[in-house]
Amino acid sequence: MSENKHAEILKNKNYIDITINNDGNQSDFTSKCTKYVHFDAPLLKKCSNYKLSVVKWKLDSESIPLSICKLVDGGQPLNAGTDFITAYKVYMKYGTDIYTTSLLFNTTDFPNNVPLPISGSGSNYIYNNIDPYFYIYSYTYFYDMLNVALSSCTALINTAETTTYSSPFVNFDSATQLVSLYTPPEFLDTESTHPISLYFNEELSRFCGEGFNSIYIIKNSISGIEENSYRFIINDNKLNQYDEYLNKTSSTDAPTWYKITQEYNTSSSFEICDRILIVSSIPTKSEIIGINNNENGSLDNYNADYQLQKQNGLRILSMFNPEIGAAGSSRGRIVYSNSNMDHSDLIDLTTEQELSSFTITLYWVDSNSNLYPIELVKNKSFSIRLAFIEK
């Protein structure tokens, strides 16, 4: 990690440019985006004579995940620690019989070199959901997990019922950012011969189901399936017959596959990053923003940051809410520019002392108000320009 700083003094204003780089010289693929900045001579003689403005900043935000994979209570790995049972469940009802499988998490396709969390002793060890190992960086990876679960659940039916049904599957098109469901007719609500009903539990349904014009979602009302689950009623609207999978000899042959594509992008259901915070030791008024991080020590690397916020508040220079539009819009590069630096958004400095050093640290806050340090991926950076404006 390296940093550059530059101070430019104009009439009544001091401009400070700071850059934090992960230059790739460290063994870890990512490093925490934080820096101690020191000037040989005091930058400000008396802080209370100045106001502060964040003029602009740029963050390479590849390390912020799309979502975090939720594990079942206990978080026990299968297969000698390679697969973890998630909280996402698929149910299929065939006749009066109910079959279920859980999505299994192995690893993300993002090469962040994050090791498997160190397990504790005993069968009651709980892996931390917030550990970066469980970050999801790919829509396709998540839907691949879903496809494996759909296939496994269909296989349970075929084994128990001596049938040969094909499994439905989903596909995410990165160009259109739309999800398509491909299904054989046995999963259509209009199929009269041994129809299969498809259910997702509440944790899974929030990622799937919206945006389809011929899939209706109703809350589960039958026993044997998790109470807060939803049935996906799949209909043939005569526009979703999928000929690529057909070997029809006549135009009157019934289709054997159906393709149902979303009408609009719902990738925002994945986006877990709610806010980005730039925090500093520059003497400004502290803010309590309501952080929900667990206090019982299970947060490990993040607990100290939470305790700091709880006890003293955070001196926040900038709070940014990413605008969720295109898939992955909170990742890649985030740029902020302030066009109102001489007016209402100026921050008062609160001490009579001089200022010759300070720290800057970046965090992101998830949709459940948990606080996480932002990491910089190798060869990526964060830069910020601050203006100290004399009153």
Image (cartoon, rainbow, N blue to C red):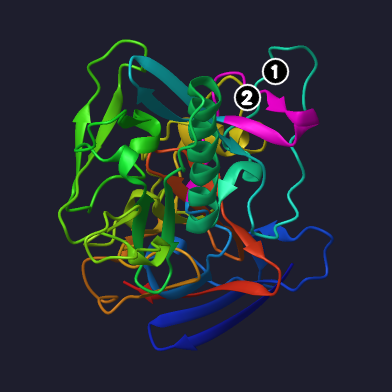
Which of 310/197 is in front? Answer: 197
Residue 282 visible in the shown view:
no
In the image, 134: left or right of 209? right
Residue at the spot 63% in from the left edge and 51% down from the top edge: 108
Spatial distance from mark 1 to mark 2, Cα to Cα?
Answer: 8 Å
- Stretch in magenta: 67-85
Q: Residues within 10 Å of mark 1 (few under 14, many from 20)?
A: few
Q: Which image quarter holds the C terminus?
A: bottom left
Looking at the rendering, which quadrant does residue 38 occupy?
A: bottom right
Above or below 33: residue 4: below
Above or below, 200 against 270 in this view is above
Q: Please say if the residues under marks 1 and 2 sit with CB atoms less than 8 Å apart.
A: yes
Query: What's the residue type where badge 1 is placed?
Result: Tyr
Secondary structure, mark 1, is loop
- 10 Å neighbourhood of mark 2: few (<14), some, or many (≥20)? some
Residue at 54% in and 62% down? 354
Judge depth for marks 1 and 2 and give the one in front.
2
Q: Which mark is residue 342?
A: none
Residue occupied by mark 1: 125
Taking the image as shown, residue 389 lies to the left or right of residue 239, namely: right
Residue 77 left/right relative to 188: right
Residue 205's spot in the image, x, y percent?
A: 34, 37
**Residue 99 place in picture, x, y as percent:** 45, 22
Q: Earlier in the sequence, mark 1 or mark 2?
A: 2
| Amino acid of disc 2 | Gly
Q: Residue furthest front?
A: 249
- Examine the image and state in which quarter residue 320 appears: bottom left
Residue of label 2? 75
Residue drawn at (34%, 49%) of the image: 269
Residue 188 to residue 8: above or below: above
Magenta stretch: residue 76 in it? yes
Quadrant in which the N terminus is drawn: bottom right
